[in-house]
Amino acid sequence: MKLMILESGAKGKTVKKYLGKGWIVEACFGHVQDLPRSGKQGSKAMWASEKGQLPDPPWEWTDRAERVVSKILSKSKKNNVTEVYIATDPDREGEFIAWRLAQIFSDFPFVTRVTFNEITKEAVGVAIENHREVDYSLVDAAKVRRFMDRLVGFRCSKFAKSWNLRSMGRVQTPTLGYIVDREIERNSHVPIPYHSVHAISDGYTFKFRFHGSSDEDAWRDDSGKFFSDRTFDISLAEGAYMALNQSKSFTVESIKPGKTNRKPPPPFTTDTMLQSASSSLGWSMSKTSKIASDLYNKGFITYIRTDSTRTSAGARDSAKEIILENYGQEFLGPGSLGPDAKKGSSNVQDAHEAIRPTDPKLETPEDSDMDTVRLYSLIRSRFLSSQMSDSVRERREISGRVMGTELSITGTASWRVHAGWEAASEKFLPEPRISEPKFDMSADSIWEIDGMENNPVMTTDETKPPRRYTESSIVKKMKNAGIGRPSTYVSTVQKLSDRKYVTNENGSLTPTDNGMVLWTEVAPIYNDQEDENKLFSSEFTADMERQLDMVEEGDISGSDMWNSFTASFKTAHDNALEIRRSKPTPKQIWAIENRINHLPEDVRKDLMGGKELAEITGKEASDLIEVLIEKESENGGPKPSEKQISYLTSLIEKSTMSDEEALKLVDVDDYSELTGGRNGTASTLIGLMKEANESLPASEPQIDLIKSMAEKQGLPMRDVLSMAELADESDITKSEASKIISNLKAMRKKGGRKKGN
């Protein structure tokens, strides 16, 4: 018997159909072992290593992996498996998983590595014939990335806790920087007012030209860009509007002919697929990734984590057959880059083909839901388009004059004369114009404006700030800057949301207060140092990605890169710690203010040594906090915070007790005698008051809600009471009412109980 291990169960089902008898196909469901996250080893930021070697940490089982792998081992031994083929994903992470599995299955007589970029019978067969050893250059690249992310994540996240922030990340933080910088740009934007006039003639837009670029009063935006169709002079705009509104036409003065060729877009890479699904289908990155992964696992498309646009000769030949059959010879184009073509840019790994259908002739994947069909159709049309000819449009730049004004009016008329690649992608494109203008395109001909409401239009507005990044546009920015790779785009953006550094509001990424603090206050401590390596700059991050690619390709050793990085990091981190010690952190300021504000002024001055809080160093702040904590312990503990007192008084007000009765529960006579902190008397009293309030009779609104919900579900009130082991409505407490309401809601979700049953 032979065993093949893949990452996905869905992929395993597809491959099993191709392998048939004599094979066991199992899924490991991703990473099986990784850097330790628990125990003493789990708290380490890095591990020591000999010169010329990478660290060798104790690799720890990931969640549920030990149980999954143990079952595969047991099944394999029971069935006398003699050959193990590890077919994890064909990328850096997949190779790392394969390495760990090869170690775990090393007792079997024959263990080998196979990869395929598409899950077809032919591809799987070729992979098995060309099995190989684990690629340790790929493994080392995966290791170094882990070690770097661990070191930065642990050390810098601990550093960020001084600002009450959750984490910092090697790629996550510079990505956040783009979002924050855009928000700062938006906040600093000063709107510039303008006036413009336009009209529609035969469906084309024509605008008045108010100024030349050399005019003293020419309109320019805040970046200095000139706009001839905008003016500050409202009287000039009103005059143009009135002239056109009265004449309802313009006379052609000049026409400049031309043609526009639109080249076909290349087949999808990971980032362009995410962007196109967002713009064409309105999908989130996570939705696109999930459906694309399912299409790949079922064998309908090639591997989805790629930054290459090359495609196989066989796939291109298949596409050309489809184009010839459906569109004709004139629709054939030069196609995308061949398999031996060079990379298009320096930050492209080019490890895999572009994303394309495994069988371009398949129009619709069988047994698929509507969303799966839509994404497949988008991928297929993009691939077919990439093999087709340019689309061609006739173009006429028209300049005219309007009776009653000396200003010229200009516009461009265009119509498509050859669809080219657009024919295969028409369902995802706006409908083009294919007919010539109805008006004569010669000098002195008259063009009438369309008889529609609000034509012409005078607009008085002001410039808008730049748009916030969306999920798709931030991925495009990451790709262009070289700070991400196909396998990390989605997870990086998702982390920013999970860490509460950005929010997604109607598709726009907006930094939170914590996100602003992290990038504007914490990251600069690393980035604004004299050392040439700015740890969280996009340039440094992109350079690390390029070096990881070089490790993967065997151009440099993983140990050399790791040693270089740790040296740079140590310098940057030590400098950051020194800078932090020069002034109090926000956390220290809060700790001091919380303990010192209630003290008499002369005591405060004495403790502060005559200085203001902003004037002391971080070391002085640390020493002061120790003194304050010591004094608190001598006086029974810290004072309660304003928030604690406010919450406590609200609880007492809701109860049937007076202040004096409540305070007596913790043996104090006045609020000033309460102590703060988790174990203080204020916290204890809050707990007691919450318990007391929960035992109060339920409020009328609670009882009314219970009755209403019970009636809607056909439940007699006696049944509701018996479920809660109560005899009468008067026995229901606030706490029990909350539980009953929750139970009724749960019953409603499950279908509830119908009347008459």
Image (spheres, helix red, strand yellow):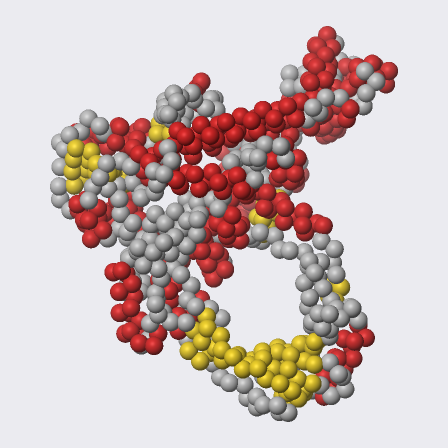
Farthest top residue in view: 634
Depth check: give the residue in front, 356 or 347.
Answer: 347
Farthest right residue in view: 602
Q: In this view, does 229 lie to the left or right of 323?
A: right
Residue in the picture at 29% in, 49% down: 117
Residue 750 seen:
no
Rendered view: 711 above or below 301: above
Q: Is residue 111 left or right of residue 445?
A: left
Depth check: give the residue in front, 180 or 452.
Answer: 180
Rendered view: 724 above or below 273: above
| x, y percent for residue 418 | 42, 78
| x, y percent for residue 399 | 64, 82
Number of marks in the rendered image: 0
| x, y percent for residue 372 | 37, 57
Q: In this view, does 295 lie to the left or right of 238?
A: left
Residue in the picture at 65% in, 48% down: 183
Residue in the picture at 62% in, 32% down: 530
Residue 137 seen:
yes
Residue in the picture at 37% in, 25% down: 52
| x, y percent for residue 671 | 78, 19
Q: In this view, does 99 lie to the left or right of 242?
A: left
Which quadrant of the rendered structure holds the N terminus? top left
Q: Quadrant of residue 727?
A: top right
